[in-house]
Every structure is written in C-alpha cells, then in structure tokens.
C-alpha cells in the first residue's frame, strides 16, 4: 500500500526534519547502478532504528522524502507502543522496481545500509522481495525479516494478523464488555497476506465473516478454505450494518465520506494510516462512539517478529507472547482515551511518547 501524501511539502530538508523531529536523513546515490535512495532515521532513543525499505516510482524527489520522513516517524511510535527496544527508521528507493532492480543494485543499497554501522536495520516493504533481502544481506548484517532458510523469521504477515486479532478482541471487550467474537458480524476489507490469516482466527472463534476484495483470486483463496464466509461488493461496504469493520487493504478508508456512513461498533484492522487525517477523523470516530483500535498499535505483530530475529535465537513462542500483549496495551489505550476524552489515536501517540521519554531518562540515569 502506498499512501503518499497528496500535499507534498515544499519546505527545505532541515525544516522538515525539524518539524517531524528526525535525527538523521541519509541520501544515497550510485552512478554505476543508478541507485537513488533515502534512509530516514527518526528516533533511536529506545534502540537502533528499524523499518523496511520500499521501492517506488515517486513522481518527484520531494514526494520520496516526504514518504520516508512520514514512514520512519510512524515506526518510532509503533515500536515504542509495542514495548520493543528499537527506534523508528525506514528507507525508500526511487525508481521502477521491475526495470532497475537486480543483484548489484540491491547489494549497492546494502552497502549504504552497512555504512550506518547498525544505527539502521532494514527489512522488506513494498516492492522488495525475499531475494532482494538476500542480496542486501550479502553486504550487511543489518537486515532483518530474512527467509527461514537463512535463519530468519520469514513472512511476518501471520504475526501481524494475530496482533490485529488481539486488538480486535480488546476493542470488542471495550465495546461489548466481552471479548468474544462469536456471532459478531465482521467485515474484512482486503483479504491479502494479513486479511487471509486474520480470517482463520475469526472463523475459529465462530464469528460471521464478510469479505471484500478487488481481486477474485484473493477471494477464492479464502472461500475455498472457509465455506461460511460471505463475499460482499467492495464498493458498497459502507452501506452495510456490521459489528466490526476491519480495514486490511488500503490506508485512508476512515475519512469525511465513510465515517458518517459507518455502521459498526468497532474498527480494528491491519492497514497502515487508516485515518485520512489523524486528528480530525480520530475525533469523528470518537464522536460517533465507535471504538477504534489504533492501526499502528494493532498491526505491530510484524515488526515484533523481525525484532525478535534481531535479538537473536528467534523463537516463535516468544513472539506470540509478545504479540498477545497487544490486547492489554490496546485496552490501556482505549481506557486512557476515555478517561482523558481524547481520540484513541491521540491516546496511543501519548503513551508511545511517554515510553520513549521514560526509557530515555532511565538510559541517561535520571
Ligand atoms: P496485500 O497486498 O497482501 O493485501 C491487500 C489486499 O487488499 C489485496 O488482496 C488487495 O487486492 C486488496 N485490496 C486493494 N484495494 C482494495 C479495495 N479498494 N477494496 C478491497 N480490497 C482491496 O497486503 P498485506 O500484506 O495483507 O497488508 C494489508 C495492509 O496491512 C496494508 O495496508 C499493509 O501496509 C498493512 N500492514 C501489513 C503488514 C504485514 O505484515 N504484511 C504489517 C503491518 C501493516
């Protein structure tokens, strides 16, 4: 999913870094391969910056810079709230992934990552494959999310889905006074990598699952496995009555047009940046008394997965336990939001910032 801000800032690099509180931004250029990349390091108070590399044909360099700044900042809050001891980082490569990427290109990028000496750990993101991960690993040890046959943690999507399931149960607990999803009407929008694994958990709990996707083959994977799932038209989902809406496709589906239409008690999904405008749309959900499980909290199972690979001796049971913790953190966030009469998104940000500040003091011995 790419959700480049439509309004790309025209400010200078330092003004943008200052405004978004970035520590360091690294511009990488290689004449031989034509590589152009930007590494954004937002905050390393909790530990080294960690976040994937995405390759995209950005229309302008400003758009690429805007994307990397926004994404790396998001990683800081995601990892902080998930209780991980890593900071926020992200990288973008500017160009056409189908035409420009090859072994040398990716190894060259790996070399740039290596030059930061472990201040930034990369992983996969949009248009970066497991093969690219292997190429980068040839030049640097600062890569996570490696394939299992390389001793890595493999596909993070099942863990992301498990975390979303935990967040959804916490949302249900807040809305209904019970976290059972049995008999609840749940719409999963987007049944790709995360959506399809999420549905396994929902079916196991005997929820009534409705699905929407724009591709038939994705739908078929789910309906072949679970006959009880009902398929709905992706264009009419906001007209549906449902208990829980789970956005697992694109960002910005919670906006001026959809929120007034939305007929559900809980929103809990995997998609990044679900609120088109964080403050405004977080408030709108609160005003409608819809429980919103913040996206960057409940989709943190994937980063927890690679974090445990980084810690060494990767152990799935430990990651599952860490991901289950999303349930408690989500309830804390929802209660904090209620107590302080702020949106749950704002509450999640406040608790993430608090942890960074508190741990920072511990580190400084204050
Ligand atoms: P994916 O590309 O595998 O799946 C997305 C699905 O959404 C696809 O099946 C696609 O056809 C469908 N889709 C696209 N537009 C749609 C529309 N308008 N209506 C309905 N369906 C539509 O991606 P994924 O890995 O499953 O990730 C889903 C979301 O979760 C993304 O926003 C991603 O950034 C976020 N996320 C994923 C992970 C992870 O571990 N994979 C981690 C954190 C966040």
Image: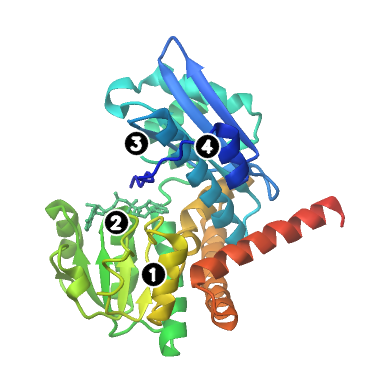
Which one is earlier in the sequence, the residue at label 4 or at label 1? 4
Residue 198 on image: x %, y %: 34, 65
Which one is earlier in the sequence, the residue at label 2 or at label 4? 4
* Mark 2 or mark 4, whichever is nearer to me: 2
| Horizontal side, residue 187 vs residue 88: left or right | left
Which residue position is annotated with label 3? 127
**Residue at point 19% right, 69% down?**
237
Residue 27 on image: x %, y %: 54, 25
Q: Residue furthest front?
A: 10
Q: Which mark is residue 122?
A: 4
In the structure shown, which secondary structural element does the residue marked by tag 3 occupy?
loop
Residue 201 on image: x %, y %: 34, 70
Identify which residue, 290 or 153, lies in the foreground: 290
Which residue position is annotated with label 1? 268
Q: Quadrant of residue 288?
A: bottom left
Which residue position is annotated with label 2? 249
Q: Residues within 10 Å of mark 3 (few under 14, many from 20)?
A: some
Q: Are marks 2 and 4 in contact (CB under 8 Å)?
A: no
Residue 141 visible to an observer of this rendering: no
Number of numbered discs: 4
Residue 270 on image: x %, y %: 38, 60
Whether ligand 1 has any atom under 8 Å from the Cβ at mark 2 is answered as yes
């Amino acid at each position: 999913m790419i959700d480049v801000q439509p309004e790309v800032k025209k400010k200078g690099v330092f003004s943008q870094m200052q405004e978004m509180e970035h520590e360091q931004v690294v511009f990488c250029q290689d004449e031989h391969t034509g590589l152009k990349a930007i590494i954004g390091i937002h905050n390393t108070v909790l530990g080294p910056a960690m976040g994937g590399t995405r390759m995209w044909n950005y229309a302008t360099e400003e758009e690429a810079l805007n994307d990397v700044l926004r994404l790396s900042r998001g990683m800081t809050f995601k990892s902080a709230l998930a209780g991980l001891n890593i900071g926020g980082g992200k990288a973008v490569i500017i160009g056409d992934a189908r035409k420009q990427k090859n072994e040398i290109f990716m190894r060259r990028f790996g070399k740039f990552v290596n030059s930061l000496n472990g201040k930034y750990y990369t992983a996969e993101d949009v248009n970066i494959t497991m093969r690219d991960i292997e190429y980068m690993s040839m030049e640097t040890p600062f890569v996570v999310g490696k394939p299992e046959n390389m001793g890595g943690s493999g596909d993070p999507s099942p863990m992301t889905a498990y975390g979303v399931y935990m967040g959804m149960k916490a949302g249900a607990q807040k809305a209904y006074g019970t976290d059972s999803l049995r008999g609840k009407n749940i719409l999963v929008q987007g049944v790709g990598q995360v959506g399809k694994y999420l549905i396994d958990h929902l079916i196991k709990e005997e929820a009534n699952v409705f699905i929407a996707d724009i591709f038939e083959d994705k739908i078929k994977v789910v309906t072949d496995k679970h006959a009880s799932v009902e398929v709905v038209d992706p264009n009419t989902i906001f007209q549906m009555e449902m208990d829980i809406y789970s956005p697992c496709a694109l960002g910005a589906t919670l906006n001026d047009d959809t929120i007034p239409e939305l007929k559900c008690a809980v929103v809990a999904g995997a998609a990044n940046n679900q609120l088109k405008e964080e403050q405004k749309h977080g408030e709108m959900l609160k005003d409608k008394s819809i429980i919103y499980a913040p996206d960057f909290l409940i989709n943190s199972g994937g980063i927890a997965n690679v974090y445990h690979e980084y810690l060494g001796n990767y152990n799935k049971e430990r990651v599952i336990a860490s991901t289950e913790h999303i349930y408690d953190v989500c309830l804390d966030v929802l209660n904090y939001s209620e107590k302080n009469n702020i949106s749950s998104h704002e509450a999640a940000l406040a608790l993430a910032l608090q942890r960074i500040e508190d741990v920072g003091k511990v580190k400084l011995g204050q």
